[in-house]
Image (tube, rainbow, N blue to C red):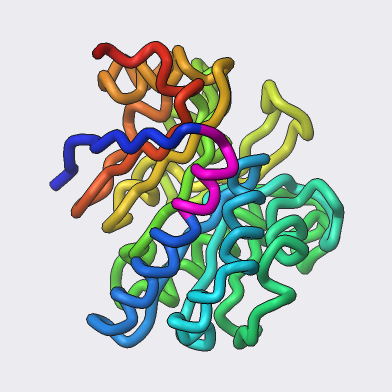
């Protein structure tokens, strides 16, 4: 079952990033204590990158056995491997290159120069199959933490307001074309995949996102604010700075 959102407000972006990093380390260590391994879905964006940098800088990061963490991405720009604009490339620079990771547990979405070439539908199907293989009979793993950034328009992953991708749930991963935010072609989890997460954390910073934060927390129409439709099965956190919280009631 889905959960009601809990809002945590931090005074400014740097505090938000460091607090989220500490929360992530603790959540992953806890998941490993309970289940042996942890599945985490990462996000891109400015505050997502700062959060990963804060994990890299934290003395507590060694509380996690990183060999037993499966890393996924809820969306990715369909660009060549290693491209500077790919979320996975940015995550490697911010954190992953500093960790002792098992390469087999780092599940980067396929790139446009990968085995499927420039066919994003085939690449989406390949990533969906990889998720299913790790899920033990389900379509996707029950992510212990699913981190989501959010745009000023309320989009999460690459699910944009009033975009045809919003209504597609035939698979856990879809190809998104004509994205309103460049680049135009992306891979994205569907709402069905996002809904499998135990904990969903929407991390948002800046006054330009305040309206979308207020609409998302209030559970407004998903077609206009996709972030409103994402809930964790155990908890849903909105981790925001004071500017992003400025239009919340009270």
**Front residue of 81 and 245:** 245
Q: Position of residue 36 (x, y in %)?
A: 32, 87
Q: Position of residue 31 (x, y in %)?
A: 30, 75
**Front residue of 46 and 60:** 60
Q: Quadrant of the C terminus?
A: top left
Q: Is residue 69 above or below residue 193?
A: below
Magenta region, residue range: 12-20
Q: Is residue 244 above or below residue 4?
A: above
Q: Residue furthest left?
A: 1
Q: Position of residue 207 (x, y in %)?
A: 55, 17
Residue drawn at x 36%, y 17% as measured from the top left: 214
Q: Is residue 73 above or below residue 162?
A: below
Residue 136 is at least partly visible in this image: yes
Q: Position of residue 202 (x, y in %)?
A: 42, 40
Residue drawn at x 63%, y 68% as measured from the top left: 56
> On the image, which quarter does residue 52 sit in?
bottom right
Residue drawn at x 58%, y 53% as measured from the top left: 51
Q: Is residue 179 above or below residue 188?
A: above
> On the image, which quarter does residue 242 sit in?
top left
Residue 15 on the magenta segment: yes
């Amino acid at each position: 079952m889905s959960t009601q959102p809990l809002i945590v407000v931090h005074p400014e972006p740097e505090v938000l990033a460091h607090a989220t990093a500490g929360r992530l380390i603790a959540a992953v260590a806890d998941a490993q204590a309970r289940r042996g391994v942890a599945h985490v879905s990462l996000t891109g964006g400015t505050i997502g990158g700062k959060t990963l940098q804060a994990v890299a800088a934290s003395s507590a990061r060694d509380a996690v056995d990183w060999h037993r963490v499966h890393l996924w991405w809820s969306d990715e720009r369909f660009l060549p491997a290693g491209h500077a604009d790919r979320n996975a490339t940015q995550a490697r620079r911010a954190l992953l290159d500093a960790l002792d990771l098992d390469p087999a547990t780092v599940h980067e979405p396929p790139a446009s120069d990968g085995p499927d070439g420039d066919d994003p539908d085939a690449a989406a199907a390949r990533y969906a199959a990889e998720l299913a293989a790790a899920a033990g009979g389900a379509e996707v793993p029950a992510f212990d933490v699913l981190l989501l950034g959010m745009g000023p328009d309320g989009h999460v992953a690459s699910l944009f307001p009033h975009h045809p991708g919003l209504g597609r749930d035939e698979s856990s991963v879809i190809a998104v074309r004509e994205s309103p935010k460049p680049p135009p072609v992306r891979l994205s989890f569907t709402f069905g995949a996002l809904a499998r997460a135990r904990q969903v954390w929407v991390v948002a910073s800046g006054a330009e996102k305040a309206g979308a934060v207020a609409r998302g927390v209030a559970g407004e129409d998903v077609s206009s604010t996709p972030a409103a439709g994402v809930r964790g099965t155990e908890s849903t956190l909105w981790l925001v700075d004071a500017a992003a919280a400025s239009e919340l009631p009270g």
